[in-house]
Image (cartoon, rainbow, N blue to C red):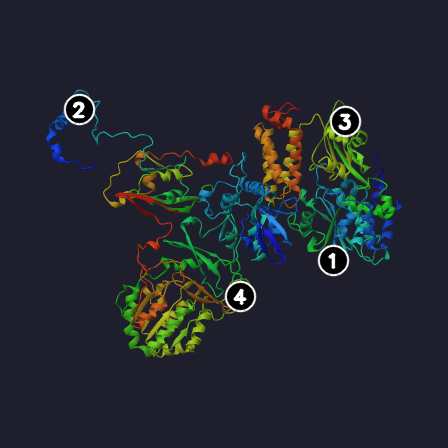
Amino acid sequence: MSIVQNSAQKSKWYLPGVIGGLGITMKHLLKNLISKKSMQTINYPEEKYEYGPRFKGNHILTVKKDGSLRCTACMLCATNCPAECIKITASENPDPKVEKFPISYEIDILRCVFCGFCEEACPVDAIRLGPEWQTPGLSGSNFTYDINHLAYRPALKGGIQSHVDDEERHKEGI
Amino acid sequence: MPKCTINGKEVEVKDGQTIMEAFKKADEPIAHYCYHPGLSVAGVCRLCICDIEGNPRPQIACNTTVTEGMKVSTKSDKVKEGVKWVLDFHLINHPLDCPICDQAGECGLQEQYMAFGKYEPEMAEKKVKKHKVVDLGPTVVLDSERCILCSRCVRFTEEVSKTNELGIFNRGDRSEIGCVEGKSLDNKYSLNTVDICPVGALTSKDFRFKQRVWYLKDSDTVCNGCSTGCNVKVYFNKEGMFRVKPVHNEQVNGYWMCDEGRNIYQFANKENRFEKGIKKLGGASLETMLPGALAKELHQLVKSGKDQTAVVLTGQYTSEEYDSFIGTLSKEFGIKKVYHWNQNEKQMGDFDGLLIRGDKNPNTKGLLKVFEKHQIKTEWQDLEKSLESKSIKNLIVAGPENLSVFADMDSKLALFSKAENLIWLGAAKVEALTSDSGKVKNKNIFVIPLKSFVEKEGTFVNHSGLEQKFKKATTILHETLTLTEVAILFAGKNLTLPSAVEKPAFVESQRRSDQVQLEHRKKNEFVFKRGTL
Amino acid sequence: MEVKYLTEFYHLDEFRFLDGYKKHGGYVQLDKALKMQPQQIIDEVKASGLRGRGGAGFSTGMKWSFLPKNNEPRYLVCNADEGEPGTFKDRLMMERAPHQLIEGMIISSFAVGSKKSYIYVRGEYDFPIKVLEQAIEEAYKAGYLGKNILGSGFDHDMDVYRGAGAYICGEETGLISSLEGSKGQPKLKPPFPAVQGYLRKPTIVNNVETLAAVKYIIRDGAQGYRKYGTEKAAGTKLFSLSGNVKTPGNYEVPLGYPLMDLIMKEGGGMKPGRKLKAVIPGGSSAPVLTAEEVAKATLDYECLAGLGTMLGSGAVIVIDDSQCMVDMLGVLMHFYHHESCGQCTPCREGTGWLNKIVHSILEGRGRLQDIDLLIKVADNMKGRTICALSDAAALPVLSFVSKFRDEFEFYVREGRSKVRGNFYAQMHH
């Protein structure tokens, strides 16, 4: 069977289709006029759609109780990243219990494919993909997220705390 | 020469060799930590157990001498189970530090656990806590929790460096490695302890947290730190070089190398190199250009002043480069005034008894050999005299790569200032040449950046006359030249660059077996077939 | 029947000093021995069937004959690092009869050709060290030590070396390491000490009781020495009887003596109202015997080996029904965890692991699978190390858990002792 239909054959019968389509439009118009609740669209940007909790949006770096970064700079996220958009520079922390931490953690969000592999690779729950998805910016540099943005942007209200706590782990003797 | 059977393979070993060595010879896998071929046998990790026919109890391979007709096997369930448990004993107090441990990726525990491990841990008790991030000395950091007390490092300081700084303190599972009171791990070979540490207990301060090891590629080459010519492995990626480790060569360096040699990666990295050709004419400001173009431009200068041109060579280049450089210049221009800049003439014969030699050039012997070949017999004093009398106008200097061992740099630059034109060839960035410090007073200065030792192939002749060929490891700066190429360009010839694509692309027979390929199956339908990557 | 062979004059205070010792036949055998050929003495000791009294029970004469036949300097070391829990016989011998040991050592040194010998005494034995030092001084003055002893041309020097209190230094090679001044850690064998020991020279290490017995073999001859004991285990032996008996102490009995008799006759039997539950026959590292097995046991190497345990150093620890076996294993594991030298991984990590498991059971955190885990861990420690310490830690675990499993299971299920009824934690706080 040919995929492409001969338009000449169908042209005679367009009127019922058009009328049917108009009917659907009219139905929705009337419905929207009567009840606003059943509306299929929202007034973006005044209104914003709530995505499911598992939605993979912009990255968040979690923090410890004291507000410092949870990330240990193990580079597993960077290793696992298929888009190679994560760049980490590790350094020695003066606190011997922490030892290694990132002095710079950059995500090139334009390269990111939001696959969530970084979240899966992370051994200490340091990186998560959050609910935000609107990422406007005026210049290219706005799309390279640094620690300041990833962990302490205003929307996070001082940082999201990680589930994995080193102190508790040490107390448990692990 | 007793013969024995290792897992069914027959091997012949030398008298007095152990089962462990027979295993290595038969190329059969056997788990081990404390055994190191360059050190004495400690027999403490108890991992290398194997069944010997006629012996009811499994024996350790590292301390059992092979006897004629011995039948050894690691295939029995008893041995396999034993190895699993001993590995578990190693791991019960080992911390979960892999994410922040530098050794992860090349760790003995990880590797052997993957190969021989139990996979079902039964330890439900608290781990023993020990000291972390202990500063052992200027080069090494210790993490006692990660340590499996194989005592390799202790034996190294006892037997190889003979400095006896390290010891095992305390008893039982509270044992820790540490420095003897009043001492710190501070000797010229201290970083070898990091290499032989099978876990991440000893880490190098220099390399610490710089890179995860799986981001690094490695390549064998020869150290150019001194005339010993240790065989080394350099680790690099697109960001540059990161570390150097020794490679076993019984004739040259055994299993070890010195700490000084581990710094050779630094001067090959971008930040310490001339990246572009530099021209500084009269009082004019600096002008940068492609090295090849600059070398070609200098053809006229060298040609016109060939009788007033002298060449100074250091012992830091390969024999091939010396040969072609001297050969080309003498053939094309008849330049015979080639001088040997030997910065450490007085310490030439020094030797510390293990590896470090006073002659800090990798190829002094090679240079002298090439001098002999081209019948060049010059004295440094002649150069000084002729520079004094202004009979030399053009001075071509193939400068050092490893600046730190050239203590006489300033005095030599002052001497070279007496020539009108200084043509400096070299990989290392010499600030005095490009800055206005006034150290270099030549009228015209030309700088042509060269390739470092990891970017080219060639031969170094070490102190004993042993010729060691090495291949190119990586490219750090693309536009740099070798001495050979400089010589060709000086002679006014063109470089024939090897074409990037040597073979025509897309030839079916040349496809890699693991290459991702499109298979045309049906009309308008393509299926991806993926090989193993 | 208790016999007085080695301990004949131990009740006399004067036996401690040279004069008193000489009055009771002291240093006569030395004179006799020095007139013999060294090989003759070795043959005599071999013929006597004397076996090492320190624990392993290896034939002494055989050990001496392993020495290489050359003129290298060699050493004799007396192992007086009596560390096995429950053993206190060597202390008695050194305190009551230092000259008996010194004479035995000089004779043995002459036999093996050693010009220098050491007595390695454990650090805690303050008084025995004083007594020995005094006795050696006396012996030097009387010419029994030093140059040309009794005009025989044989030179010999003797020193007391004080250990610093480590169980592992009672192990032959660990003792040699300690004697050399390094950390007391056993050395890899081969080479054996008889070939390469102290300062890499051939070295013989013997227990106090073994060396003291040499004098009696010279006195009575090999056949005379065989008057006591069995065919394979000749002579008498001192047993340190301790635990829940009426009269604990050191008793000398001939080898092959019934274990039950030692407890009931020499030890005076159980305390009133108590029943025998178990006996550790050879120091804490020997597997435990239940009451039924005790009835069958005689005190010689073969019979005890047949019962799956060993004679060891002769420390008989009697356990009655008021003792909780889990508690006892807790104490033993604490000891072995503390004393493991930390060289070999299975022992270093295994002793710590066993200790933690037993203590988690004792603290009421135990799981039923922990009991099997104890067996698994102990099984995999056994025979996997340089010295026998990991066996010493593993064997009690295996025997305790397999023979008294009900007590362990009760403790895990109920969280309290079957015998005591209360918690370990309450007992200690």
Name the spot of residue B400 as percent of width and height, x first.
40, 66
Q: The disc labelled 3 sits on which kind of residue?
A: Met
Q: In this rendering, would B77 be left or right of A64? A: right
- Label 2: element kind: helix
Task: From the image, tell me which residue sits under label 3.
Answer: C270
10 Å crowding of disc 1: few (<14), some (14-19), many (20+):
few
Q: Distance between the residues labelled 3 and 2?
A: 100 Å
Label 4: chain? B
Rendered residue at 78%/40% (across/down): C92
Tell us which disc is closer to us: 2 or 1: 2
Rendered residue at 79%/52% (across/down): C109
Task: From the image, tell me which residue sits under label 4.
Answer: B351
Q: Quadrant of residue B273?
A: bottom left
Label 2: chain? A
Q: How far apart are marks 4 and 2 (CA)?
A: 94 Å
Q: Distance between the residues labelled 3 and 4?
A: 76 Å
Label 3: chain? C
Name the spot of residue C379 as percent of width and height, x first.
62, 37
Q: The disc labelled 1 sits on which kind of residue?
A: Pro
Q: Are marks 4 and 2 on the same chain?
A: no
Verify CB contact (< 8 Å) between mark 2 and mark 1.
no
Q: The disc labelled 4 sits on which kind of residue?
A: Phe
Q: Distance between the residues labelled 3 and 1?
A: 52 Å
How many marks are shown on the rendered structure? 4
Verify CB contact (< 8 Å) between mark 3 and mark 1.
no
Query: Which numbered tag is attached to residue C73?
Result: 1
Q: Distance between the residues labelled 2 and 1?
A: 111 Å
Q: In this orientation, which residue lies closer to the viewer: A41 or B282? A: A41
